[in-house]
Amino acid sequence: MNQSVPPTAPARWDWMVLTLIGVSTIGLLSAVTEWTARRLFSSESRVALQNCVVIDDPQTGGRGIPNSICREKSPESPMVVYEFNGCGHRAGIPCGPKPEGTLRIVMTGSSFAMGARVQREKSFAALLPEELSRTCGRPVQLYNESLEWSYTHGTALRFKEVLAAGPDLILWIVTPGDVERAPVVVATVAPDPGPDRGLSLSAKAWQRAKAALATKSVGVALSEVFGRTRTALLLRHYVYRYESPSRYLESFLQGGDEVVGEYKAELSSHWQDLMRQVDSDAADMEARARAAGVPFVATMLPSEPQAFMIAAGRWPPGYDPYKLSADLRAIVEGYGGTYVDILPELRDLKDPAQYFFPVDGHLNDAGHALLAALLAKQLTAGAVPLLKAAGGARSAAARGI
């Protein structure tokens, strides 16, 4: 009678081989994923934008370098050309007097208004005057004096440039991010780390891991190193893009007050201090505009979380996506300016995510086109006499875009 032979336990060498195969497989999959992510989300800075902007002058705030050209590709955007005219503005036109018979709007603000991450001709700064000209029945020119890293106080410091451009009307663009950084004048832009330059991917990862481990726990260090990989960017990009609005908001609103405080129904003392800075900057700019006899108009552009909340028509208790806009309206109108509100127009959006770069958070081409239409609709609705729609004229926004 044959007796079955009991299975023998794997030898130590077998366990070592199995472990090596498992680790190698994980490493190979990780390498392939990172390689793929780097192809999908490549970045290139031939002459990075910060090389065309003075960002470290506390007396003037940020200012563009006249007649400079920079090309930059962020991971989620195409290669973008930033070309500054003789006055250091990404205006798309030379600085100087406006054409005869043209109404000139001078726009000021930070990165959203400048058109960061998109070609200038795709930005709402380029699209808006075309729509306004059709609606108003007269030539309208928009001279864009906006600059990335120029938040509300930096914009106020640079306001003499706005007046020097000879405006018939001033348009101040504000975002929640501008309020978050309202007092910032000297921007911080991290260059490529010197020790990393020229190293392979594995060598860079090892250098960064050693630096992180020197001051942090193993878990925190590994999380920090992974967060700087393209794989992490790929995961965040597709999670943010295709996640349901409710799940997106749930994860976003788990941040602390510095991240989500601008969306609270009751602002914390920190955010109240920031709004006081905005109030001071608005008072300064509006007083100078009034002295020059130039109408001053302001609006708030939405961040991605604001757009999600407004489009969904609901938000968690204790939050209010309209709060910051309402406070800005009170400030601007309190000093005699005009406020136009485009946020209620976002209630009809079907998919807010399609208008933003998911991880970066800036507007993409579709977002700029949308805001050009919404701004044209509100600016010509009657609140701004100079831009009142001509008889029978209707903007594309009013036709339902």
Image: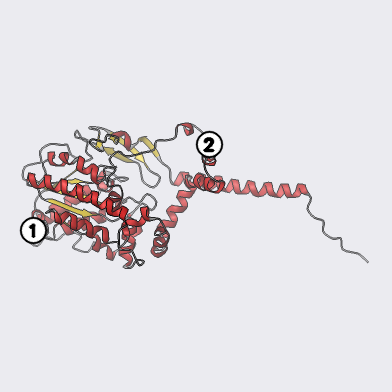
* Amino acid type, residue under disc 2 in the picture: Gln
Percent x, y of residue 221: 53, 45
Q: Is residue 65 left or right of residue 198?
A: left
Which sits earlier in the primary sequence, circle 2 or circle 1? 2
Question: Residue 91 location in percent, x, y?
Answer: 20, 41
Across and down, in percent, residue 20 comes to 68, 46
Q: Position of residue 357 (x, y in %)?
A: 36, 51
- Residue 390, numbered circle: 1
Tell us which disc is closer to us: 2 or 1.
2
- Specify the farthest residue to the right: 1
State left or right for residue 334 relative to residue 78: left
Q: Is residue 372 among what the camera can see? A: yes
The secondary element bearing badge 1 is classed as loop
For image coordinates 8% across by 51% down, the residue present is 138
Hey, what amino acid is under mark 1?
Answer: Ala
Is any atom of residue 146 visible in this view? no
**In the image: residue 31, left or right of residue 86:** right
Asked if residue 368 lies left or right of residue 290, the reply is: right
The residue lying toward the viewer, choosing from 103 and 248, is: 248
| Rendered-image quadrant of the C terminus | bottom left
* Nearer-the-camera pick, 139 or 115: 115
